[in-house]
Image: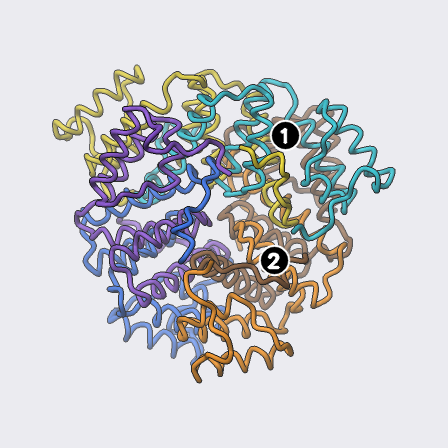
Chain colours: A orange, B brown, C purple, D blue, E cyan, F yellow
Amino acid sequence: MATHRPIEYSQASAEVRAVYDDMLATRKTDYINNFWKVLANDPANLKRTWESLKQIMGPGALDPLIKELIYIAVSVTSQCPYCIASHTASARAKGMTDEMFHELMAVVGMANETNRLVAGYQVEIDERFKAG
Amino acid sequence: MATHRPIEYSQASAEVRAVYDDMLATRKTDYINNFWKVLANDPANLKRTWESLKQIMGPGALDPLIKELIYIAVSVTSQCPYCIASHTASARAKGMTDEMFHELMAVVGMANETNRLVAGYQVEIDERFKAG
Amino acid sequence: MATHRPIEYSQASAEVRAVYDDMLATRKTDYINNFWKVLANDPANLKRTWESLKQIMGPGALDPLIKELIYIAVSVTSQCPYCIASHTASARAKGMTDEMFHELMAVVGMANETNRLVAGYQVEIDERFKAG
Amino acid sequence: MATHRPIEYSQASAEVRAVYDDMLATRKTDYINNFWKVLANDPANLKRTWESLKQIMGPGALDPLIKELIYIAVSVTSQCPYCIASHTASARAKGMTDEMFHELMAVVGMANETNRLVAGYQVEIDERFKAG
Amino acid sequence: MATHRPIEYSQASAEVRAVYDDMLATRKTDYINNFWKVLANDPANLKRTWESLKQIMGPGALDPLIKELIYIAVSVTSQCPYCIASHTASARAKGMTDEMFHELMAVVGMANETNRLVAGYQVEIDERFKAG
Amino acid sequence: MATHRPIEYSQASAEVRAVYDDMLATRKTDYINNFWKVLANDPANLKRTWESLKQIMGPGALDPLIKELIYIAVSVTSQCPYCIASHTASARAKGMTDEMFHELMAVVGMANETNRLVAGYQVEIDERFKAG
């Protein structure tokens, strides 16, 4: 159970409701997921987090679906079950196929493996990689 | 300094050289980076790791550049300086622009932030996200 | 289910009971939580862990409530659901308000975000921060 | 070396300079650290990150010094050398004593230890901790 | 619930069944655990992962039981509940005693603690440890 | 540079010197590494950490060399360069061969990989693994 009760739309203050309205319009959905309803107990953090997310996850040089895949990669590496479940659903809704998901998992697994081989063998950074 | 001396091409056994040759041909380069040269101290692990990487990072449902971005996302979350440096170079070589890199960083930062908000507020997984 | 059955007070050996007694007296409670009851299967580790915890979490230059907040920050970053639940309860008992909790979460989220931006951009440590 | 060159005040665009000015005024300093100068290559992220940080790290229910300690706790758990160095300097500037630092380290170490004991023993959350 | 339905032996393609057969023969068991049945949705990854695991976890310079202990140490540090549960069962089957498990947990906890003390105090690597 | 100056034997207080003496005698060496010399700035933490380490890393159901391998596995997973360097040296001194090290690295890499596959596929714990 969450540390705070989820705040439903009908109970929300005007400040929270404004965020919910923007979220529903932006996402073209009538569903607000638990993360936001719990975070709504801190309206300032709700607003700041939503506005950052909206700005960051929207279209740009990277497609929104690609951004969802990156989000999953981080959430799997951090071991966050909620985030994995919710962003896997978002990625599906944006067109992630089974084949994409399998390839994503293979890359994430491989990267976590080689991250540790590099650390354990104490490999030094090649001069040519230092230029950034 | 690495726990083991890097094994240069000229010093390599036939077994290691066969991996190096495949790597150079696959990557269309004449450069072998430190990770592989150090891992070559364990030829079985070198071969297995290279063959997995070649299979996983090649073209598929996801573009090789997208796979590099995912690799960077994991390496940044795991805090692996070598991996960040080497895969940032690979991603550049495959066409990553500055704008893509900035967006990648923004998503990785945001995901790491919300991964912890979810955990700290002990948010329960929405029923609709449980279907997988 | 835990790897080992929790050891209740009534079943405990004299060695374990001595730790339980000290814990109940120190904490002014009649409740021993599952962590300790499971760890009691290894009496040496139980005793060592409890004695370290008692010494570290008591009053000092930092207030015990502040120490609980720091404990939560670590547990959220490590993604440990049990630790988050139990130390959030402890912090509440020591006076953590909702407002404190929300600010704690905001800082923990922000720090996890910037930890990754710094790594991804490969930012070098400023000379003035090297003096320690 | 960072992936992007630090942008000095004298080279900065009006957009970046506005953030720098606010930062210098808010922090009552004439020094901008490398993190911000590198992040300035992405002005939108610079502005968003600074504004979030300013809002989150300022006075509130928790003292700014306490927030710095929490920041260090996260950065140490995440193993981010830059973040540890820069926020240790910030905490010193806000009044962190040696004794506070030692206690902070002891709590962070202890929490990381017990986070793993709990996971390894697969301890179940006590009913009384589930109410949040 | 897993993102993909587990694939039972009776439903499996010839490709997947060949992996299952090798697994059952190698492990001298008639049980395939959920991880493999879910991973079977991506036959190439199933085969590659199983073949790596079989090669890595078998007898060598380190005993298979010791390898299981190392696997648990990593899984506890990464906070992976499934992996902790399944590899604790494997280690038990290979002869891990309660005393070994308790000592393993103590080392894992201690290492996680000192990993952070070292980071927080920004300890420099001793010259004599640099030779690898 | 460490946050605190290392305290050399000749400068140490009687309290710190007693810990150093016990360390030198227990380890049959005349060398104290930087970690302890820096931690000596907090004598209570030095003493507690050393006594725990001595108790935990000594002979028991697991051989001291095996305990060093487990320590390395954790340190690599946590990405702690100092800890990897110092415990690799300790393990070498206790008899770790190259072959053991390579196998250790392979297991640590593999475990980190499968930890993420399990999380990403949201695999449920098998009933038979729940008994602990």
| Residue placed most toward the observer, F35 or A68 | A68
| Residue placed most toward the observer, F78 or F24 | F78
Q: Are marks 2 and 1 on the same chain?
A: no
Q: Which residue is mark 2?
A: A85
Q: CA distance from mark 2 to mark 1?
A: 38 Å
Does residue A47 appear to the left or right of D55 in the view shown?
right
Does residue C104 appear to the left or right of E32 in the view shown?
left
Q: Secondary structure at mark 2?
A: helix
Q: Residue furthest left?
A: F14
Type of amino acid at the residue the image marks with label 2: Ala
Q: Residues within 10 Å of mark 1 (few under 14, many from 20)?
A: many
Using the image, tell me which numbered label, if any, was put on residue B40.
1
Q: Residue at x 15, y 30 (%)?
A: F12
Q: Position of residue C84 (x, y in %)?
A: 40, 51
Q: Position of residue D71 (x, y in %)?
A: 34, 56
Q: Residue at x 57, y 39 (%)?
A: F112
Type of amino acid at the residue the image marks with label 1: Ala
